[in-house]
Image (cartoon, rainbow, N blue to C red):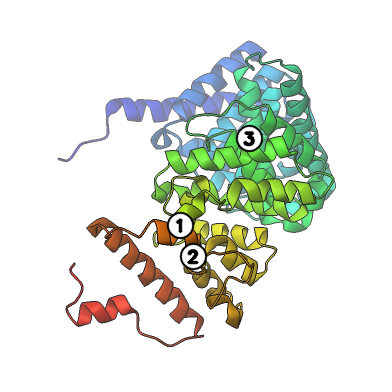
Amino acid sequence: MYSRPSQNSAQDKAKVDELLTQLTADLQDEKLTAAQRKNLLEQLKVLGRNPANSDSIFAKKGIETLCEYGFDVAELDVSQEALRCLANAMLLQEAPRQHLLDLGYRDKAAQRLRNNDRDDEFLVSRIIFLLTYKTTVDLEDLVEKNELASSISRNIAGHADRLSDSAGQPAHPMDDMALVESLKLLFNVTAKKPELIARFASCVPDLFSILSHQKLPVPSLQVPVNSIISALMNMHITKETCPTETLTKQLINILDLSIEAYPETQLELAATPLLTLLRKIQAVASQDGRKHIQSLLLPNEQDRAKPLGQGDSLSSRLLRLSISPSLNEVRESISALFFELSDSDPTTFIHNIGYGYAAGFLSTHQIEVPETMMRTDAQGAAVNPVTGQRLAAESENPEPEMTDEEKECEAERLFVLFERLKATGVVNVENPVHQAMREGRFDN
């Protein structure tokens, strides 16, 4: 059904034009009081949330007016109200972001972030964050000239101090909102300019401290937890800044809860940063710290009562995800994490998770499998090298007939494994699932 533009929409657009005209004129006349200026900007903010009303805001002249009020006007309330209008405009359209750069307000924005004010931190961090998308901003120059790394690090440290001193008291909503904007800005700067990561080294212990004081949301990988993990994912973690075993266990618990809470379609985006962070931690952890991570993630003796991956433990669920055809990043990250926890040794890797789970990763990365591995477990334990199950458990508990669902899952797993093998070019074999379908032996 055709609908004509509403009269209210036309009136709102005219009102936006009128408000901007008044505000622009007062930059020269200075006849309005601070309260009147703030009131006009508040009206503009509300109307500007609808892009249909906001053409004059998005225009370069409109952005110039908002920048002058936001960065050049002395009254803090007026300035912050203008920054809210500016942040909304930059969120709704790309053009205002480049307008701000072209008007020369990049440096003033970065300098404003030095203020010890949570509203400023929230607003200016968001504005600079938006400048990192589809603009000509030079992030390296921005950081070098305006102490941006110091400002972000100082704000992160302030949140760490606040949380450690809060004794469980609820935070002001703006505190948490400002933290999330700082984390998003930190992530984008370090993701887009990895050469600047070293400038933010002091953030690492503060980020781990903030994470240790966070009450986990449900599901767990939501703000601010996912924002903290994403920021840490880009950081250089050293032996000195490696988290405690208690915090590492908390991260693994978050992974466990996330696998339970999120469907596979969401895990790809939600869990990959956490898996990347765990890989970084295990790489620099002490010997005792690595053993602790291995004990929490790798299959244990109880898991080996069945073929690996068939139980309900975290390691079993991770193994099943490591061969899921619907996952790419998570599948690779889990296999890489298990390989690194196996000292990057293929023999140890196969012993730890079984050849059935290890084969795809080893072949994709062209890692040679020891010839003796498939004849006997090279670690000297009585373990089936393919399934990872104890040989004694195999004789005591013969495998029951597979259900139709289990057969379908196994066929899907084999399909993915053979496709990964073929992609490497190491072997040239026909996928048995394709062959079975062609010969009519596969019921679809």
Quick one: SS at disc 3?
Answer: helix
Q: Please name whichever residue, 199 or 91, is drawn nearer the observer in this view of the structure.
A: 199
In this view of the protein, can residue 56 be seen by the observer?
yes
* C-alpha distance separating marks 2 and 3: 40 Å
Q: Which of the two marks, 1 or 3, is nearer to us in this view?
A: 1
Is 64 rendered above or below residue 46? Answer: below
- The quarter in which the N terminus is drawn is top left
Is 125 rendered above or below residue 349? Answer: above
Amino acid bearing label 1: Ala
Is 352 rendered above or below residue 184? Answer: below
Q: Residue at x 56, y 38 (%)?
A: 254
Amino acid bearing label 2: Tyr
Which residue is the site of mark 2?
A: 357
Amino acid bearing label 3: Glu
Dot 2 surroundings within 10 Å: few (below 14), some, or many (20 or more)? Answer: many
Q: Residue at x 49, y 45 (%)?
A: 313
Residue 221 placement, left or right of 251? left
Is label 1 in contact with label 3 (beta carbons under 8 Å)? Answer: no
In this view of the protein, can residue 131 be seen by the observer?
no
Is label 2 in contact with label 3 (beta carbons under 8 Å)? Answer: no
Quick one: SS at disc 2?
Answer: helix
Name the disc covering residue 181, or none.
3
In x, y percent, where is residue 121?
70, 29
Is 386 rendered above or below residue 114? Answer: below
Which residue is the site of mark 1?
A: 393
> Of callouts 1 and 3, which one flags the residue occurring earlier in the amino acid sequence?
3
Which of the 4 quarters of the picture holds residue 335?
Answer: bottom right
In x, y percent, where is residue 27?
67, 26
Q: Which of the two marks, 2 or 3, is nearer to us in this view?
A: 2
